[in-house]
Image (cartoon, rainbow, N blue to C red):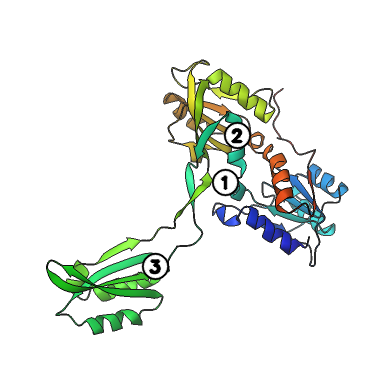
Amino acid sequence: MDLKALLSSLNDFASLSFAESWDNVGLLVEPSPPHTVNTLFLTNDLTEEVMEEALQKKADLILSYHPPIFRPMKHVTWKTWKERLVIRALENRVGIYSPHTAYDAAPQGVNNWLAQGLGVCTSRPIQPSQAPNHPTDGTHRVEFSVNQTQDLDRVMSEVKRIGDISLTSFSARVDDEEQTRISLNCSQKALMQVVAFLSQNRQLYQKTEILSLEKPLLLHTGMGRLCTLDEPVSLATMIERIKRYLKLPHLRLALGVGRTLESRVEVVALCAGSGSSVLRGVQADLYLTGEMSHHDILDAASQGINVILCEHSNTERGFLSDLRDRLGAHLENKINIILSETDRDPLRVI
């Protein structure tokens, strides 16, 4: 597949607009065009060892879940390992693409995959995503009424002179008086001009309503998942399910105050990777994530919430097998998709 066509298909699979604003997602390294992709190489983290494997397996594009380029680079030399990744990719005409939080939020993404290890449950995003655009023009709606004694034509003319607005009017009866209701959508910049005009007329301004237009929420899309089990289980049973699903010999557990291994688990709040900011304050029997700060763990435990930590990438990496199958079907098996065999979490228990 041509690289541009593949990028378009990847965006159709999970839109990059789902990603958090702070994230660095999409095509990070691009060989000079045209660039044909026969082999797509999947990894959770792109280390130098993983890059060597990708080159040996003749990868044309590396999909690295975590972006290897996050902070801006001031130079590209052989000095640091991330700079060397860029050099080796360009020298060997290998592209690098990262979806990161776009895949966290996607309905068929990392957090949904992680939730499947809990058992049969219903789930919803903890922090729902918003649509990338407003359903209507502008970011604010301004509404006010003009009565019959006021100069409607003059008011309409003055308002229309303000750029970046869309305006409608209709008849309305207010306090047994026939009035014309004006409703306009405008940008943040235009809002200040509209307010400045209306404030010149005390009667108009006193009856003005200003609404902030929110982008609609996207169903089943967003950060984290709040999962309610169809059949509650003991904490001990849930621990075994998670270890089995993630193929881990051990994990870390903080018992909530007053809880034991036999305590009932019905509601699980989870977030793949680092979950502190997403899970903080969520009511649940159990928090499941890769890592959390010491103090956030103490806060959760004090509220009787159990916390399970599996190390950061252990809550993400298993998704890649599912991704390989899903992408294969989505791309109609037009390219070869392979998983890294050397990618692993950097932490070990010894």
Which image quadrant for residue 120?
A: top right
The residue pinned by badge 1 equals: 107
Kindly report the distance in space between the C-alpha atoms of the residues bearing marks 1 and 2. 13 Å
- How many residues crowd mark 2 within 10 Å: few (<14), some (14–19), many (20+)? some
Query: What is the secondary structure assignment of the residue under circle 3?
Result: helix
Q: Is residue 81 left or right of residue 271?
A: right
Query: Where residue 327 sits in the image (x, y, percent)?
Result: 71, 49
Could you say which is closer to the camera, residue 115 or residue 328?
328
Give the residue displayed 80% in from the left and 67% down from the top.
34
3D distance between C-alphas at marks 3 and 2: 42 Å
- For marks 3 and 2 on the same chain, the one whose residue lies earlier in the sequence: 2
Which amino acid, by three-letter code, is at mark 3?
A: Gln
Q: Is residue 279 above or below residue 134?
A: above
Quadrant assignment for the C terminus: top right
Does label 1 or label 2 sit earlier along the sequence? 1
**In this figure, which residue is indicated by the disc labeled 2?**
116
Q: In this rendering, which labeled residue sits more in front, label 3 or label 1?
A: 1
| Residue 55 position in % (x across, y down) | 85, 49
Q: Residue at x 81, y 42 (%)?
A: 49
User: Tag 1, which secondary structure?
Assistant: loop
Q: Earlier in the sequence, mark 3 or mark 1?
A: 1
Q: Residues within 10 Å of mark 3 (few under 14, many from 20)?
A: few
Disc 3/disc 1 C-alpha distance (Å)? 32 Å
The answer to whether residue 73 is visible is: no
Quadrant assignment, res 117: top right
- Amino acid under label 2? Gln
Percent of width and height locating residue 1: 78, 60
Q: Which amino acid type is marked by label 1? A: Pro
Residue of label 3: 188
Residue 50 seen anywhere in this rendered image of the structure: yes
